[in-house]
Amino acid sequence: HASWTVFALSGGMKKGTSFSFGHQNKKPMIMLVDGASASLKHCFLIQGAGPAFGASQGGKLILSVTLVQGFTIGVEAEDSTLVVNNSHLGTFGSLSLAYNMTTSPSDGDFDGIYVTGGQTTITRSVVRAAGDDCIDSGSGSGGIVNISHSIVESCRHEGLAWSNDGPNTKTVHVTDTVIRDCQQAVELGCSTLDTNIVLTHSVIIDSLMQAVLIIFHCF
């Protein structure tokens, strides 16, 4: 557990190290594996050469009233539990590339939050200014994502990007949330029929291209 703590200038990869995690293959500032858990409240994570957080194999991360800013990814979680409330996650991408939403998405999957499987809950929070997607629930199997009373904005690609290659069910509920100023607000990519996406009482505005793009079931 950490409270009123500043974490800065970490992550990435050094030559000669064999550690790797996630689709960026970089070392997070804080890594949780094999059921490890971390709870941060009133904390500040500022700038790193890799992701701020990584979690896999049943890891659990709770962020409350916390700022995460200036990493390649905010959080990447695989088959883990992620809880974000009253927090701000923003400015994700290469430090050498200026953010410009009107240009093509950056290579490198610079997402605000990237989750596969597990369970994710985001409440009363802001996720913004990512070089790729604000929140990406990738092609890994299944998972549950609940987003409420939040703001998702100013990301170079999708605000919310969903896909599911099975065999497990993926369920997403988004309610009372604003999705704005993204190239596409919501995308449902290649997915099995066991994929349920529900948006209610939400606002989608200022999309550069489509507000909603559905590809679906391309296996």
Image (tube, helix red, strand yellow):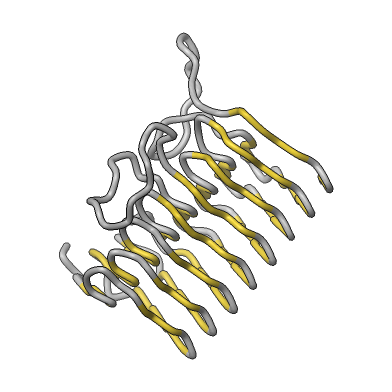
Quarter residue 157 falls in: bottom left
Nearest the camera: 26 or 139? 26
Q: Is residue 162 visible?
A: no
Q: Is residue 165 visible?
A: yes
Q: Residue at x 57, y 77 (%)?
A: 148
Residue 119 location (% of width, % of height): 56, 63
Q: Is residue 144 above or below residue 82?
A: below
Q: Residue at x 47, y 55 (%)?
A: 115
Nearest the camera: 43 or 123? 43
Nearest the camera: 196 or 152? 152
Q: Residue at x 70, y 54 (%)?
A: 66
Q: Is residue 155 above or below residue 170?
A: above
Residue 113 location (% of width, % of height): 49, 54
For the C terminus, the image quarter is bottom left
Count of marks placed on residues: 0
Q: Residue at x 45, y 74 (%)?
A: 172
In the picture as drawn, the residue positioned furthest to the bottom comes out as: 201
Q: Is residue 13 above or below residue 158?
A: above
